[in-house]
Image (cartoon, rainbow, N blue to C red):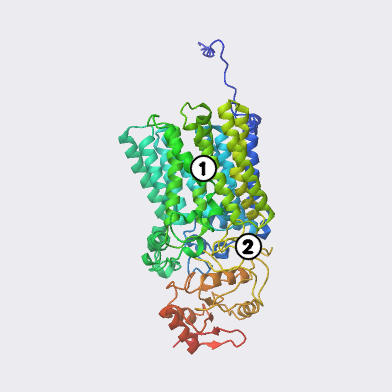
Amino acid sequence: MTTLAPPPAPSVPEGRHRAAVPTASSRLRRMLTGAPEDPRWARPALWAILVLATALYAWNLSSVTGNTFYDAAVYSGTKSWKAFFFGALDSGSFITVDKPPFALWVMGLSARVLGYGTWQLMLPMVAVGTGSVALLYRMVKRDFGAVAATIAALALALTPITVAITRDTNPDPVLVFLMLLGAAALMKAVRTGRLMPLVWSGVAIGFAFNTKMMQAYVVLPAFFLVYLWTARAGLGRRIRNLAVATVALVVSSAWWMVVVDLVPASSRPYIGGSTDNTVWDLVIGYNGFGRIFGAGSSVGSQGNGAGFGGEAGLYRLFNSIMGGQISWLIPFALVALIGGLVLRGRAPRTDAKRAALLLWGGWFVLHYLTFALAEGTFHPYYVTAMAPGIAALAGIGAVMLYQAFREGSAAKWSWVLPMAVAVSTVWAVVLLQRVSGSGTLYTVAEVVAGVAGAVAVIGLLLGRFTGRQRLTGIAALAAVVALLAGPAAYSASAAGSSTNGTNPTAGPSTGGMGGGQRPGGSGGPGTSNSGSAPSGSSSSSAGSQSTGRPASGRTAGGMGGDSQVSSAMISYLKKNQDGATWLVAVATDQTASSIILESGEPVISMGGWSGSDNAMTLAKLKSLVKSGKLHYIVVSDSGQGSSNSAISTWVKKNGTAVSAYSGLYRLDATDVG
């Protein structure tokens, strides 16, 4: 028998070595210290920023009250998988919240695994908030280096409204993270020309759609433009890939809507916020055109955005309500976008840096126009979605303009960076002047911003014209301090305050319904009444108990009114529930969510968040009472709409008033004619 010799080992050319197989320790070392080609300070700086972001988002979580509207839906989802899937406000699945349920699913799974409570709901928000900072760093670093990425990550971490909303249970942090995932996949598709990253980008935006519907699509024009123009593939292949990715986008966006709308209305909850009990109406009306054009476009939109974020117009994001939340770096970002595109003007079509500028510039501009001009319901915390675009442009612009400033031969580049720093510093001082007297923190920030800005501008000019590069570098660091001192003060304020869930903002109150960390006030869709507990009700905060059942002491509204539902009334209702599915029926989501969180029992919201939804009809109410699923209803002397008036009239005529509690009536099967 002939024995075959093993093939000779491949030779290694002289002067070259085989690549060592990465070990667990080497991978860990690289994760902690960064790639060998990175500056030694880069990875420690990233970790420091991520720790800072986590601290801002998670500091003193026990004080966070969250948004009782979403908290109640999450709690209900832990009690019923049906309520979990549909995003129902109550575990009996009478009505849904006014948003798709993906963010509720994320919080709900955390609560199912770890138990219901404040930190269990907040843990996913902190995770996606910090993850967004890390993801933005990675994206910017790939094309513009560690310095730009570090500035961008720090700017995002210190965006005041981002800190405020990440310390809440609104769905916006999840939305931002999913949009960033979509952007990262898009840029990979641009660099490689491959189809699958583009498909995954569409899927990510589809999940974002199932978090907050049409708001997720704001970035899509920029996504399509960037890929169609800059991807490394022929035009035909780019068009084909976009078509396939669009199919993925539509499927991942529409699957939940299609499933829900195919389920018979009698077998699912009413779609809160809709006018015809369909998710499609919610998409195009209340959460679509209603947000842009106001109440006139949809019964469910209820317009009047001026009450929360100021009058619609190009100046909105600079007004006294919005300015301190998001506008600090807008002047610098705008100069950076224009300057960066000019500097890359003659680059090849597939230039990665110009593609990134187009992406982040489109992200910023599209969000700015959408939020500034929206005539419908507009809350300040919506603008957290534009923060990644501003932060990325700030980091990219800082590096590109600094390099042009130091190396450019054209005289104009000697003035662009100092001008951008000067304008942004002046605006920061103006914003801090608006809240002068609100506390030492803002006074110190104003002084720091003003002094550091002056040092930066003077140092840049002197360094440029004297050739002293060390002075130029020090001035650049001073510019970073000047531009971030104000946001840092607002963010520290947000981290030290408990958000009220109604309309979380950072910094001191500046007037209007959108200003400051104030208790109380009524909110719009997706909000809850907040503030101190009413007389006779529990004073514990939502999610603070360790019993697995939340607690909430909140003002509860009646059928068309604002009667209080005290802890004593809730105790009475539970004692006399008599096997009914629902503890009580009330007018609005705000009232229902508060009772759900305090009682742990299902509660019917007959009219959605504002009382205007047609979720409850007189025929449906009679059916629930006759079947023994509901015994108690809270009504008041006034009604909202003919349906609610008819219900109030019928209840008062046929029900038995509970004399100890104003507006409370008991109905039994024998009361139904």
Q: Amino acid at mark 2?
A: Thr
Check residue 122 in the rendering and tell me which mark sits there, or answer none: none
Q: Is residue 109 above or below residue 332?
A: below
Quarter holding residue 493: bottom right
Residue 205 visible in the shown view: yes
Position of the C terminus, as image quadrant, is bottom left
The residue sitting at 41% across, 70% down in the picture is: 266
Q: Nearer the viewer, residue 254 or 166?
A: 166
- Mark 2 sits on what residue? 65
Quarter holding residue 660: bottom right
The residue sitting at 31% across, 34% down in the picture is: 235
- Mark 1 sits on what residue? 332
Q: Nearer the viewer, residue 106 or 421?
A: 421
Residue 491 image point, x, y percent: 62, 51
Residue 369 image point, x, y percent: 42, 52
Graded by Cα atoms within 10 Å as few (under 14), some (14 to 19) or many (20 or more), the crowding at tag 1 reads many
**Element marked by disc 1:** helix
